[in-house]
Amino acid sequence: MSITNEDTEKSARKPRIRDAEATKARILDAAKKEFAKNGLGGARVDVIAEKANANKRMIYHYFESKERLFQTVLEDAYIDIRTAEQKLKLDDLEPKAALAKLVQFTWEYYLKNPEFITLVNSENLHRAKHLKKSEVIKAASRKFVNMVGDILERGAAQGVFRSGVDPVQLNITIAAIGYYYLTNRFTGSIIFERDLMAKEAIDERLQFNVDTIMRLVCA
C-alpha cells in the first residue's frame, strides 16, 4: 500500500491545526487575565503576546483586532458560566432545591472566577458595545432565562412559588446580591468594619443570599 502526497499533506495539516488551536487557547487565557486586570483600554497586546508565548502578528491573524479579541474573551466568559449552569441539571430537582442550588452556584462561581466580574465591569464601561454584536451570548442567555422560567413555573404549579415571578428580574437579583458584595468588598470591609472576605462572612453571605431569594419567590 503506497502513501500518496494527499495522505502526507493530511497528516501534516493535523499537527498544524492542533498547534493553531493551542496557540489561540494560550492567547485567550493571557488576554482574559490582561483584560480583567487592566480593562479593554489599559490592556496591551504586546503583554498578551508575551504571556501567551506568541507574537502580536499571530494575535491579529487569529482575532483581527484588540476589540475583537476582547469580544471573544467576553463570549468565552459568558459561555463558561452558562454551560456550567446547564450542567447543574436543575430540571431533575424539585423547584426549591433547584433554585437554592442556582443561588449557591452563582455565588461560588463569582468567588472562583473573579475575572468574570472584572470583565463584566469593563464591558459596562463600554455600554455593552461588544455584547451587542454577540449572538452567541444572547442565545445562551435566552436558554438560561428559559431554564429559570421553567423552575418558577414548576414551583408555581406545585404551590411552593408565587405565580408571575419574572425570570429575568429574578436572575438580575440573584446576580446582584453576589456581584455587589464582591465588587464592593474592599470599601464595604472598611465602612462596616468587618472582613467581608473572611470564611465565616462568605458562608454567612451564601446563606443570606439563599434565604433572600427564597423569601422573594416562595408562596
Image (cartoon, rainbow, N blue to C red):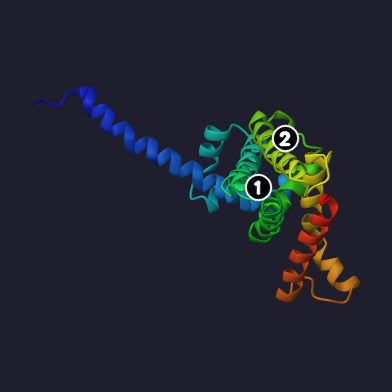
Visible residue check, residue 130: no
> Which residue position is annotated with label 1?
44
The residue lying furthest to the left in this view is 1
User: Which quarter shows the N terminus?
Assistant: top left
Kind of residue sitting beneath label 2: Leu
Q: Give the percent coordinates (x, y) of residue 71.
A: 66, 37
How many C-alpha atoms fall within 10 Å of the one at disc 1: few (<14), some, or many (≥20)?
some
Residue 159 placement, left or right of 11: right
Name the residue at 68% across, 57% down: 114
State the SS at label 1: loop
Residue 47 lies, in percent from the top left, at: 60, 51
Query: Which residue position is annotated with label 2?
Result: 131
Vertical relation: 82 (above or below) 5: below
Is residue 161 or residue 52 the one in the foreground?
A: 161
**Residue 27 rendering spot, x and y as whole percentages:** 54, 45
Q: Which numbered disc, 1 or 2, marks the residue closer to the eye?
A: 2
Image position of 192 with respect to 15: above or below: below
- The three-letter code of the residue at mark 1 reads Arg
Relative side of 129 to 52, left or right: right
Q: CA distance from mark 1 to mark 2?
A: 21 Å
Identified at 63% across, 60% down, the residue is 112
- Residue extending furthest toward the right: 191
Residue in the image at 78% along x and 46% along y: 159
